[in-house]
Image (spheres, helix red, strand yellow):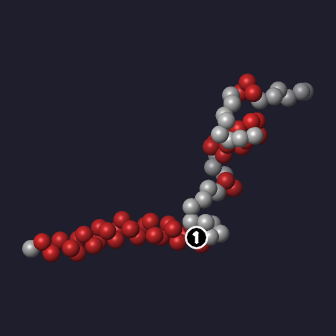
């Protein structure tokens, strides 16, 4: 009958829920109690470089500027 599908539904719900719960616990343990945070020290590559460049040039990472705003080096 209809109740025969309940074990399958339970397995599917568990399979979709457990990874999220494990991720939450792992972040709490390995990220100093913050369950969702960005780890800029991990070296995210080009994204991190762009973030730091915008922060250095304009003072805010939310105001991007192009290459024309980077001062030339005096050699």
Instruction: Tell me the element at label 1.
Output: helix
Q: Relative to 20, does residue 70 appear above or below in the rendering?
A: above
Q: Relative to 8, is 74 on the left or the right?
A: right
| Quarter of image, res 69 | top right
Give the vertical position of 2 relative to 62 (above or below).
Answer: below
Bin the neighbour count of mark 1 within 10 Å (Cα to Cα): few under 14, some 14-19, many 20 and up: some
Q: Which residue is mark 1?
A: 28
On the image, the x and y values in percent for residue 28 come to 58, 70
In this image, 71 relative to 27: left or right?
Answer: right
| Residue 70: quarter of image | top right
Residue under the point 41% across and 70% down: 18
Asked if residue 69 shows in the view, the reply is: yes
Residue 36 lies in quadrant: bottom right
Quadrant holding the C terminus: top right
Q: Position of residue 73 (x, y in %)?
A: 85, 29
Q: Position of residue 45 (x, y in %)?
A: 64, 46
As drawn, the residue found furthest toward the right would be: 75
Most extreme residue toward the top is 68
Residue 53 shows in this picture: no
The residue at the point 29 percent across, 67 percent down is 12
């Amino acid at each position: 009958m209809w109740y025969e599908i309940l074990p399958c539904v339970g397995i599917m719900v568990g399979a979709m829920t457990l990874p999220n719960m494990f991720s939450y616990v792992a972040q709490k343990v390995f990220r100093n109690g913050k369950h969702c945070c960005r780890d800029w020290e991990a070296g995210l590559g080009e994204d991190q470089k762009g973030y730091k460049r915008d922060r250095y040039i304009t003072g805010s990472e939310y105001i991007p500027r192009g290459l024309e705003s980077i001062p030339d080096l005096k050699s």
